[in-house]
Amino acid sequence: MPTTTIDDIPFDLWYQIASCLDPQDYINLSFANRKLYSLLKSDFTARNAVQTDTFTKLSISHTREGKLALAGKITYVEALRRTYDVREAVANAQPYSACLVAYGEAFLFNQGVLCYLDRGEIRTLDVHGAAREEQVVNIGAVLRRACTVSPDFSQEVEFSLLNYSHGIVAGLCEMEGRQAWLIVLDIRAKCTRKNGRLLLLQQLESSRRIFVRHNEKVLFYGTHSEFAGHGHHEWVIHSWDLTQKKPLAERPVQLENFVGSEIGSSICFEIHDNHFYAISNETGFEDEEIDWTSYYICLRFPVETPHNVEWRRLWRRQHREGPIHDTWTNISLRTDDATNQLLIVESRREWRRAGSEHYRTYYMQPLSCFITDPADKKDGVGQPKDWQTGSEPHSSHESPSPGFPGYLPVPVLPNDPLALALDDRNKPNYEPPKKRLRRYYHPEYDDHEISSPNRRDFILAKTKYRTYNHCASAFVDLVNDNSQFNQPRDHLRLRIGSRKRKCPIGEDGLLYPSELDEDNKPIPDSDERFESRGIKLWPPLHSHPDLLSLLCPPKRCGNVEAASDERSIIYSTDPSAPGGRRPIVLISFDPTIRLDNIRRLSVKLTAEESTLPVEIDREDTRLSKGKRKASIDIESNRLAPGPSTPSARLPIPWFRTEEAMYLHINRSYWLR
C-alpha cells in the first residue's frame, strides 16, 4: 500500500482544516513546504479561516484586519498575515516602531486615536491610520460660547478629559466653589450633525468619582454619590441621547447594593451591543469572617430603556485558593476579537494554596450569562450553572430592583466545621468549586519558571503599567528598570510574558484527555494545553542611546500614565523640566503603522530574556487608584497667539485642523 504524505491531502480537506486554524497555526503551517505555502496563500482558503463561525474561538472576523478583509480593502491572506505579525511582535517583545508623538498635560487613547490636552486645546491624532493631521479644539473659545448658557464659564475653569470614543470627547469643567459641568464635543474632521459639534453641556449635581462611557449615539455618566440606607455610597448612572440632545430617562439609575468604588481595581463599566454593563468583583460592603466563595456581580440594561436592569452572579473563585494581594488587582471588560462577546479580564496576585510564593494570574471570564440561548453559554469554567444565583434556576430573568439584592441565602453549606459557627448575623457565600478551562487563565510563571533562579519580579512601585493582551496571550508590563545602570536616570522597559498552545498530542503519543463535568461528560476545550514562551525585557541594555532617551525623556520618569490596545502602547512621563509638558510616547507592534517622518535606527534590537535575581516586594503602594486624569486651567477669554500689537490679536477659531505635532518633534524610529 503506497505511503500517504501531507502533500496527498486533497484541497477540499485543507479548506475545512483552515476553519480550525488561528492565524499563528495557519501561517506556520504554510511554512512547512512549498506546496502548502502555495495552497494556503489562496484567498479562497484564507477566507474560510477568517470567516469561521461567530462562536469559534479562532476566528479573526472581528479584528481590525478581519473587518478590512470583509470590506474588501485587503485580501484574506493579508488579514491573516497582518494579524500574525502583530501577535508575534507582542508575544516576542519585538515592537516595530517607537515614536515621541506629542507633548501635553493629559491624554486618552481609544479606538486607535490619541486624544490629548495641550496648552488649553484638545488635539486628536489617528495613530492607527498614521495620520499627518490633527483635529484641534480650543477650549477657551468653546467656553466663550458656553457663557451664554451660564455665567460660571466666564471665570477660570479647570478642564480634564473623561472619555473619547467614536470621534466624540467628554470633559469635565470645574469652577471655583465646586461647581462642575460636563461638556461633550464632536471633534471629527467632518461633522455631519445638524445640531453642531456641541452635543452636551450639563451641570452636575456631583462629580464624585465621575466616569463617562459613550458611543456615537448615547452617553452615560456615573458618580459614586448617592448615600444609601446601609451607610455606603452607591453609583448613580445618568443617560443622554446625543442625537436628540435629551435625556434617555426622566431619572437616573441607582445601582442598588452594587459594591465597589475603585474603577479598574474592583469595578468596571462599558457599553457593548446597545447595552450598558457594570461588573464588580466584590459581593458585600462588609467582609464576612466565615465565607467560602467569591462572585462577579454583573449588571446590564438596554441603552434605550436604562431602568430595565438585569443582574447576574458569576462564580469567581474559592477563598481556599489563597489570599489575594489586593494592590495588584485590576479588572476590565474587553471585547473578544473571535466572538465579539464581552470578556471579564481580571489580574490577581495570589498566594496559591496559602504558600509562600505569590505571583500574578490573569483570569478571563466570558460574559455569556445574559445570553438567552443555553447552547451559546460558555462561561469558561466548564460546568453549566444558573447564571442568576449560582444555585437553583430563577423563575424569571428580571431583577427585583435596579441593582443586586443585598444578600442571597445559601441553600446548602459545605461540609466544613466552620459552618457550625454560623448564626443569624452571618451572611456567607458558598458554591461548589468549578473547573476552569486552561484557555481562560494564564499564570505569570509555569511550574518550572516559578522556582527558576532566572526569575525576576518588579515591585509595584516600579511597575508603572500592567495589562493583558488577550489576542497575543501575553502579560504586558511597563517597568522602571535602573538596576543595571550606573548613571542616575530611570529606564523604562517592556516586560512581556506570553504563552502558546501546545500540540494536542502528549509525549506518550496520545491525545490529551478531556476533563469531565459533574455528569461525567467531557468538557469542551478542556483538552487544550499551553506552554510558556518565557518572559522578555525590551529594549535590551545595550540599546541605542537615542532609543533609551526617547522611551524615558526625563532623568526620572516620575508618575507614568499609560493606555494600550492589542497593537500599541501609549504612555506619558513627568516633564523633563518643572512646569513643562509631559512627553507622550508610542510603542507600536503593528508594521502598518508607519508615521511619515519615521527613520530607521542603525542597531537591530532583540529582546533579552529575564536573567536577573528576584526583587523582594517591599514597596507596594497603590498607584493611580481613584485619581482623576490631570487637568489644566483654562481662561475663557483666551485669544489666538500672534503679533504683540493689540489690533493684531484676533479670537481663535474653536475648531481647526493642522499638521500633527509629531512631524515637528521628528523623533520616530523604525526598529526592524
Image: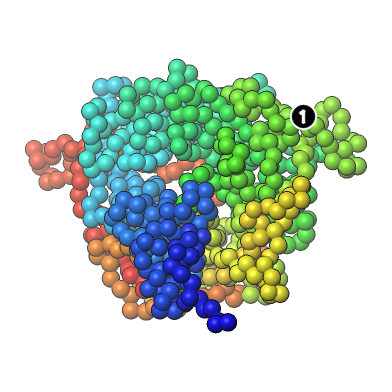
**Whole-percent x and y of residue 299?**
57, 32
Give the camera-side residue of 447 and 67. Answer: 67
Picture layout, residue 163 above or below residue 469: above
Viewer-proximal residue among 19 and 636: 19
Which color scheme is applied? rainbow
Question: Which residue occupies 58% across, 46% down?
Answer: 366
The one nearer the camera, 390 or 110, is 390
Find numbered disc 1 in the image and state the secondary structure of the residue it sits on: loop
Q: Residue furthest top?
A: 250
Per the image, the residue denoted by label 1 is 409
- Quadrant for the N terminus, please: bottom right
The residue located at (71%, 62%) in the rendering is 513
Q: Where residue 486 sits: x, y (%)?
A: 50, 75
Quick one: which residue is furthest to the left in this view? Answer: 647
What amino acid type should be assigned to the residue bearing mark 1? Answer: Pro
**Is residue 500 shown left or right of residue 52?**
right
Query: Dividing the picture into quarters, in which one does residue 34 lie?
Result: bottom left
Tally the marks. Answer: 1
Q: Residue at x 62, y 67 (%)?
A: 504
Q: Is residue 338 left or right of residue 429?
A: left
- Answer yes or no: is residue 610 visible: yes
Q: Residue at x 66, y 60 (%)?
A: 527
**Image x and y of residue 230, in percent:** 68, 24
Q: Residues within 10 Å of mark 1 (few under 14, many from 20)?
A: few
Which of the pair 363/175 is nearer the observer?
363
Residue 671 place in picture, x, y as percent: 36, 72
Q: Is residue 558 visible?
A: no
Left or right side of 250 for 286: right
Residue furthest bottom in the image? 2
- Answer left or right for 558 relative to 367: left
